[in-house]
Image: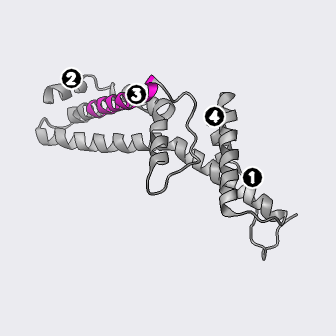
Amino acid sequence: MLTVLDFFATWFWLPIPLTALHFLWCWFKAYPLYLESRIKDRSSPKAWVFLPSWWKGSLVKVAYPIMLLLCLLSVLSWTGAIAGLLPKSLFSALGAFIVSAATILWLQRLWLSQNYLLQRECYFREYKEIAFDYHSKGKTIHEADLRNRCMWEHQQSLRKAEQSGRLYRYLQAKAKSQKNIGILDDNEPHAE
């Protein structure tokens, strides 16, 4: 183990490109793994989650092993770089490994969940817009019908954005939109 860390300590610059490669893989190729886990979550499945059309075939099979390999290489390279700065001992190497592994795993979860968080924000923004539209017209809609309509419109919008090659830009723009949706309380005055 110490010889592997000595190798990574001599290549002290290697953690940065390996971590960048890990980030790019998680952010652009492996994020549907997290989306699938949200769909299959037994406690509260998310039927509105949109999986991109390119997520099929061999990529589904290799995405997780490649992500694990990049994670392991990132952890080992950071451990080697940190251990190279510390006194040579098994205790310091183990401490560097634990700190590196915890940090990289936390970052990996953050990178994988980013697309889901954007989709969730877009879905609930769409939900509020549809609810406000019905409310402002004085129409009533059942909760299940509202969810179904919102889910359908959300999926269609994301499908169109993906077909035009701007899915991520669409998610970011809609999630960060500053458009004020309005107040849904009948007792509150609202601008017409």
Amino acid under label 1?
Lys
Give how far across and how far down residue 116 sits, in percent. 53, 45
- Name the image quarter holding residue 7: top left
Give how far across and how far down residue 192 sits, in percent. 88, 63
**Could you give the CA–CA distance between mark 4 and mark 1, rounded to whole angstroms?**
20 Å
Q: Which residue matches tag 2?
A: 7
Give how far across and how far down residue 111 sits, in percent. 46, 40
Q: What stretch is highlighted in magenta?
A: 58-77
Is residue 72 in the magenta section?
yes
Q: Which residue matches tag 4?
A: 167
The answer to whether the residue labelled 2 contacts the one labelled 1, judged by CB atoms less than 8 Å apart, is no
Amino acid under label 2?
Phe
Residue mark closest to the camera, 4 vs 1? 4
Specify which label sits upstream in the sequence, 2 or 1.
2
Amino acid under label 3?
Lys
**Could you give the CA–CA distance between mark 3 and mark 1, rounded to whole angstroms?**
40 Å
Q: Is mark 3 on a helix, strand or loop?
A: helix
**Residue, x 49% and y 42% (percent of image)?**
35
Amino acid under label 4?
Leu
Q: Is mark 2 on a helix, strand or loop?
A: helix
